[in-house]
Image (spheres, rainbow, N blue to C red):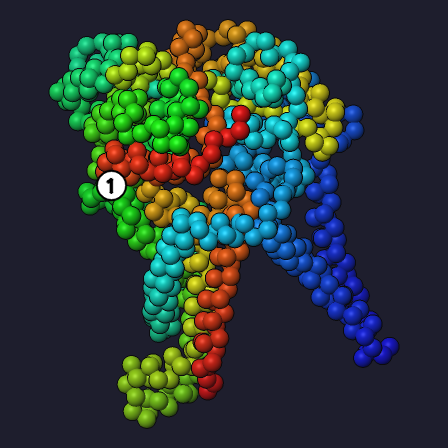
Amino acid sequence: MKKRIIAILSAAVLAFSLTACGGSGGDATGDSGDKASITIFNSKMEIQSQMEEMAKEYSEEKGVEIEVYYSSDTVAAHLSTRYAANDPYTISMVDAKDVYALAADHAVDLSDQDWVKNTTQAITIDGKTYGFPVCVEARGIIYNADAVKKATGKDFDPTTIKTTADFQAIVDECIKGGMASPTGVMKEDWSLAAHFLAEVYEQHDDPDAFIAGIKDGSIKLADDAKFNQLMDTFDVLKNNNYAKDAAISAEREVTEQKLAEGEIAFMFGGNWDWSVINAYDYSENMGIMPVPNDATDGSSEKLVGGGSKYFFIDSSENTSDAQRQAAKDFLNWLVNDEKGQQFIVEKCALVPAYSNITLAVQDPLGASVKKYADADALIANYNYLPDDHYAKCGASFQKYLAGEVDRAGFADEVTAYWKTAEVGAH
Amino acid sequence: MKQNKLSYKVGQYLMFGGPGTLLFLAVVIVPFVYGLYLTFTSWDGVSATKELVGFQNFADAFTDGDYWWAMLRTVIYSAIAVVLINIVSFALAYLVTQGIKGQNFFRAGFFVPNLIGGIVLGYVWKFVFNRAFVAIFGTTSLLATTEGAMFALIMVSVWQYAGYMMLIYVAGFMSVSKDVQEAAKIDGCTSAQAMRHVTIPLMRSSFVQCIFLSITRCFVVYDVNLSLTNGDPFKSSVMASMHVYNQAFTYKNYGLGQSEAVILFVVCAIVGVTQVLIGKRGEVEA
């Protein structure tokens, strides 16, 4: 008898543990009573603690419970598991290309929102606005003016560096002044292919036509002027790289530390790199300048960039209308409330994408970007590259960086990639 | 109550095996079958509709050159790693069963790498290869070359699994009775001969187990691959699992990635089962 009771008990415990697992899945949909509670997916790791703090304060002030989640998975991978589990976030922060991929199935139309008129960076598909731009980010050459001054003895004026020859000259001057190798190159495939190679497409007047030309063979990438001009500048970066012999094992943190501390003076990157640089003992005078090149189209006076990271609100039945309203209120708060603005600009040190936010950007890289953005000197991002572009062309670019292939070989590999790849629908 | 009635048997089974069966169904069988279904769709991982495309994904998988390169790389990596893991762990097991002083401490010490998760371990070794070795020897990092990255992967895997397999070999050594070893010695065997002709044949089941475990683990290696090399340099150290993951989640070809995963599973199962069948055939008992 006793054994029987034990057996029944253990079976009951097991059964309970099973139902308990099932139960917790149901709770997460968040339809809890009158007090709206929303979830936010954050894909900017560097602002996670600020987001959590903000969520707490916002809850206390507005009575709307906010939970902030982060995942180190790629955005698409993480969201796909949440959609598969019928448990999407109320608000998700994604990259521009994800908005194009997800909007039709999963996003709410935000065209009627107040903030739309204050930004030029929102994502609009077929006349409907789906993506709320979180910030503006742009790419160029990050410079450390203090390091240049120390090596050359002269104040560094980034606006004087316009052509590849100018860039080579200042690098040579730094070397003469005792800086062994003045540049650094991030070997990460996203930096090489999604950021640098993408500038080749983006600096053409019509990137779509350019890519179509590569695809049908009417444009030879290896002979393309823009490609060669930008690669000439890349060669300067590559040839003076502090990690020239082992460029592929250079770690991003080490490169950025050297840049911050003035051991090197130039690196290709964007204002997001500030989150890494400010972890070190950085120099006062840093900034971003356009990638110098020999083109005469003015591209060497413009950064490349625009809206980066977009919020969209879930449209599925797993999210209640009350939650959706709370989410819209939250987005409005970010743009129109003083505290929301302070959160974006001061707490997170982001460059705001809204004309009504006038707070000064604090970090020097962000300030550079803001300067170019205000002067309307940003070349727009091309957001429709296929998902495997950065990985496959990045691998080819890494081969070029390591000296395994020459420029013609690199151009061939990129051309071969485009033979089968399709740009995203837009 | 009659104990041989079907209802009684079913009841008993449900009571004891039911929860386990249910769990197994829920976390293994159902996802597996659902995964098989997804291989017949062109799903991208997020869209609401899953369009059926028949065997297109399998056809694509067979023509996906990158996948087969990754597979070949995995086979080479596994072959070398499995041999090394088993040689090292067998040697370690031999050392720590000889009654040396503090052998329990050594056993624990060799086992520790296995307690560190593969992700952490990868980052630790990345630091060692990229900074420590470079600072000490003044050479360029191993991880910067294609061969070096593969070598690093193999080395770290051996370091990670040797301690775990050692435990199985230790159990194997202990299970061989002292009587037969002594008998062999009395009959005039040297220790090497006793090891070769008596101990090792009696430990055959340990070998079968260890080789099976190391093969299956090496074939699906992902965590160390991710944190140590992440496929660098230029995607030349991408193993099959990582390719499958990238295909499904990063490139958003979920159906294709899933069918490549199924092929990997089949290859892995065939290799593993064949090895166990061959290994079991020659098992002897004292």
Measured along the vertical axis of the image, is residue A211 above or below residue B200? above
Q: Chain of mark 1?
A: A
Task: Tell me if residue B16 can be seen.
Answer: yes
Residue farthest along the right direction in this orientation:
B1
Q: What amino acid does circle 1 point to?
A: Glu
Look at the picture and state if B249 lies above or below A221.
Answer: below
Q: Is residue B261 left or right of residue B181?
A: right
Write the residue at 78% across / 25% down.
A34
Residue extending farthest left: A176
Point out residue A35 in the picture as x, y percentages from the top left corner: 75, 25
Q: Residue at x 27, y 46 (%)?
A: B145
Question: In the rendered view, does A41 fall on the left or right side of B150?
Answer: right
Mark 1 nearby-residue class (10 Å; few <14, some 14–19, many ≥20): few
Q: Is residue B236 left or right of residue B171?
A: left
Taking the spot 48% from the left edge, 57% from the top edge, the residue there is B264
Q: Position of residue A300 (x, y in %)?
A: 31, 14
Taking the image as drawn, is residue A271 in sight? no
- Which quadrant holds the N terminus of chain B? bottom right
Q: Quadrant of residue A404?
A: top left
Q: Residue furthest bottom?
A: B187
The image position of residue A272, as x and y in percent, is 42, 23
Q: Relative to A42, say whether A333 is above or below.
A: above
Q: Position of residue A14 (x, y in %)?
A: 72, 57
Element class at badge 1: loop
Residue at numbered disc 1: A404
